[in-house]
Image (tube, rainbow, N blue to C red):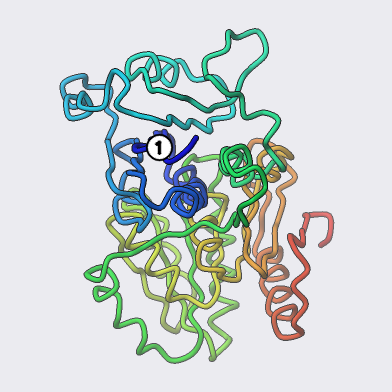
Amino acid sequence: MQNPKTILVVQIGKIGDMILTTPLFSGLRTLYPHSRIISMAGSINKDVPLFHKDIDEVLVYSKNILKNIPMLKYINGKIDLWIDTKDNYSRTGELLLNFFKPVRSLGFCFENKKKIFDTCLNDFKNGNHATDINISPLNFLSRSELKITSAPSVYVPEYVRNKFSYLDGNDGEIVLINVSAGSKSRYINTEAWTKFVRKLKSEKSFTLLLTGLEKDQGIINFITENSGEGKIKFIKTDNILETAEVVRRSSFVITPDTSVVHLCSAYNKPIVAVYPDVKWNLEKFYPLCEYSQIIISGDKLSLSDINNEMLENAFYKLLKRINSGNAESRTRVRKEDH
């Protein structure tokens, strides 16, 4: 398309999905510097596009029909280019497309389903990572003329940066431990965390920080109260942008598979990331940082077999690789290695 006036990108999924859609925002801005780029978000992930430099407007989709009234100004051909990169069929996505009636639409086509979009993106996907899927529209629109980056980008407003500026005064490198995840199956045993923290406390050069959701305060209290003498501080964050700023100010991050992984990809933070043994999930959501250590559980349904020795082994391997300058990608540690 030549200079579409309005481009709308649909991403009403999880926070991590939105973070991994940001390379598309940046690529569209490069291709169409004068277009109005709109993000259709959900109430959970709206903060990511709200402050992104390449987004002009955010429409927040709600299951409450009355809350969608502000969107009506864009129905009946007011959107020149509609982009939906969801790689599995969505009834909601189809309903939204039919309601807005954009001039042109891009999206994925699926077997045994009628063609929804004007252009199918299936042949323009150059990899299986979520960012490869999300930038597939750029491969179609640019016809290889654009240098495309798959690195996510998260922009934090100044008032959030100022809120956590005190972290600059910490002695030693900050090791951030995130204990929360999107589902209970992604939680690491509290006792494993506690023993791991006790080990890191012996390293005088580290400042240890804990972060997690409010509902996991019991886990956080247990770790801080039972990991031995020495300081470990809980950092309360109220939204994903505050979490992003804490990640940005950290030196290393240890976390289960959750949106924190993708924040590390945005800021290129060395990470130990823990995943269940689900091949497609790891292939789609592995960290894009220069330095990463991946621990894979022996269980497809949980991280219950992850222990403190596995966490320690992965963390010290990460340190060794950083110190040696060996940025071997996606190094994995399995339980059988111990």
Q: Residues within 10 Å of mark 1 (few under 14, many from 20)?
A: some
Residue drawn at x 63%, y 59% as measured from the top left: 288
Q: Seen from this angle, which residue lies furthest front?
A: 2
Q: Quadrant of residue 57?
A: top left
Percent across and percent down for residue 82 are 43, 29
Percent across and percent down for residue 283 are 70, 44
Q: Quadrant of residue 220?
A: bottom left
Tell me: residue 17, above or below residue 52.
Answer: above
Q: Horizontally, is 97 left or right of 126 in the view?
A: left
Residue drawn at x 39%, y 33% as measured from the top left: 12
Question: Disc 1 residue type?
Answer: Pro
Residue drawn at x 54%, y 72% as measured from the top left: 197
Tell me: residue 164, above or below residue 271.
Answer: below
Percent across and percent down for residue 4 are 40, 37
Q: Quadrant of the C terminus?
A: bottom right
Residue drawn at x 17%, y 24% as measured from the top left: 69
User: For mark 1, what is the residue?
Assistant: 4
Q: Secondary structure at mark 1?
A: loop
Tell me: residue 306, above or below residue 292.
Answer: above
Q: In this figure, what is the number of numbered marks?
A: 1
Percent across and percent down for residue 1 are 50, 34
Tell me: residue 239, above or below residue 323.
Answer: above
Please tell me which residue lies in front, 218 or 76. Answer: 76
